[in-house]
Image (tube, rainbow, N blue to C red):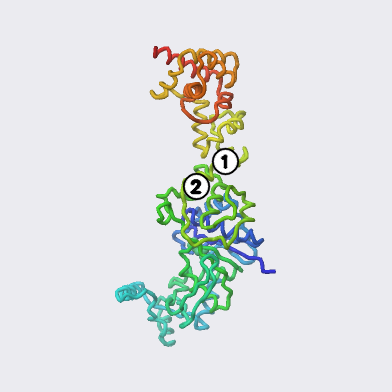
Amino acid sequence: MENPCVTRFAPSPTGLLHLGNARTAFFSWLYARHRGGRFVLRVEDTDAERSTPEHVTALLEDLAWLGLDYDAGPGREDGHGPYFQSARGGHYARAFARLGAEGHAYPCFCTTARLELDRKLQLARGEAPRYSGTCRGLAAAEVTDRLAAGEPAALRFRIPPGVTVRYPDLVRGDQSFESDALGDFIVRRADGSASFLASNALDDAEMGITDVLRGEDHVANTPRQILLLEALGLAAPRYGHLPLLVGPDGAPLSKRHGAASVLDLRREGYLAPALRNLLFRLGHAPAEDGWQTLAQQVAGFRADHLGRAPARFDTTQLRHWQQEAVRHATFADLAAFVPPRVPPVAAESFLAAVRANVVLPADAGRYAEMIYGELGDPPAELRATIVGAGREAYVAALNALDAGADWGGLTAAVRAATGLTGRALFKPLRAALTQALDGPELGPVLLLMPRPLAHARLGAALAACEAAT
Ligand code: GLU
């Protein structure tokens, strides 16, 4: 049997988890879970200035909220860690020493200004910018002297010439790159820190990662990382590059498209299953349409159903899945949707009454006001609808209400007194009772509404009719 796979999610905690990375995390998790493999979380916090403990905490909370548990990672050591890159300096140093000793890397003394100048010259000549090779062939004695004199030096990987790097991309199919088109790249910066290319690849190898799903923005890094691992005799993972997320206008996804961070969506009241159903379809074509539980998604996730085309995010779809999520939720899942205004004993019947009309907690808040709040005077338009039913309607409604009638009894009494039926009957009564022309079914709403309040609203409608004549 094939060895079980190990995937990982390797975020940089320099900001909040956004949808693109949430999808990468989810797909990597699904990939592992579908195959009975392991899922690892590695925090790439090498950017000491922009990485913060707050972002790490938020990240862990977002992943837990999404239901993405990890087998190894922060707080879950397994002997392949530590899982914070900031704690892995020793691992990198050993690899750099080997690269240097075996001639796969060399000290590079080029200053930023020098590199920038080379870049400009190359661009001016119409060439693709890459390291020009200034320090590639320095004599050993010169290197020793300059290092001894304390000149700052980065360590640069020596790309082997004339090699074709081939790898099968899990998403994009067979790829091939000519090494001659790649410039030597930095593995250790002059300040001693490991570069992204180095730390990311070394960690994958040392942590036994077999399969990597990551964003398309890393495609150009892959051949470099494969060559680096090869030089060290380490196995490279299988890579798959997920297409970019774009907005409805085809531009890279941003806040402008309503694509907030996972934390923002959580705060607005989006439910994790809604987000999972949305993400499941962004660049992955499920075999089955429609709502899926997490277990169904684990069973149905197919790496060969990952697509190359940019994946389009749309808030309409997000709302659609949120509606489905609310429909499928238990009462406990929706507890946070019940506004404080609703008496605790009525919480469950309130949710039952409104959930078909609720997408976000804010909607439930509006309905709670509608059922329990002070509504004030209705706007003119609504007033015309209310008054249209005539005073007899409200006299009958009030009598029925006082006699303890429910919604069925109340409408029957109004129908008998006025001859109104259908919309002509229901619309004014809804307007009088809730100051709205649509909303949740009125039967359950009237059961929830405190009787004195219903009485007062019908009484106000009666008064409005009398004032109008
Ligand atoms: N820290 C990198 C990022 O967030 C990880 C890239 C990768 O998954 O290899 O883009």
SS at mark 2 in the image: helix
- Disc number lying in front (2 or 1): 2
The residue nearer to you, when weighing 6 against 77, is 6
Residue 16 picture location, percent across and down: 48, 53
At label 2, the amino acid type is: Gln
Residue 388 in sight here:
yes
- In the rendered image, which residue does mark 1 sit on? 326
Q: Which mark is residue 243?
A: none
Q: Which mark is residue 317?
A: 2
- Which of the two discs, 2 and 1, labels the residue nearer the N terminus? 2
At label 1, the amino acid type is: Val
Q: Residue at x 42, y 87 (%)?
A: 139
- The quadrant of the image that shows the N terminus is bottom right
In the picture, measured across the screen, residue 165 lies left or right of residue 4, that is left
The residue nearer to you, when weighing 105 against 254, is 254
Distance of label 2 from label 1 (alpha carbons): 14 Å
In the picture, measured across the screen, residue 437 lies left or right of residue 294, that is left
Q: Point out the residue furthest to the right here.
A: 1
The residue nearer to you, when weighing 74 against 452, is 452
Where residue 406 sits, quadrant-wise, is top right
Label 1: how many Cα within 10 Å (few below 14, some 14–19, many 20+): many
SS at mark 1 in the image: helix
In the picture, measured across the screen, residue 33 lies left or right of residue 218, that is right
Where residue 90 sits, quadrant-wise, is bottom right
Residue 54 picture location, percent across and down: 50, 53
Residue 74 in sight here:
no
Q: Point out the residue furthest to the left here.
A: 124
Does label 2 point to a residue whose CB lies under 8 Å from ligand 1? no
Label 2: how many Cα within 10 Å (few below 14, some 14–19, many 20+): some
The residue nearer to you, when weighing 355 against 129, is 355
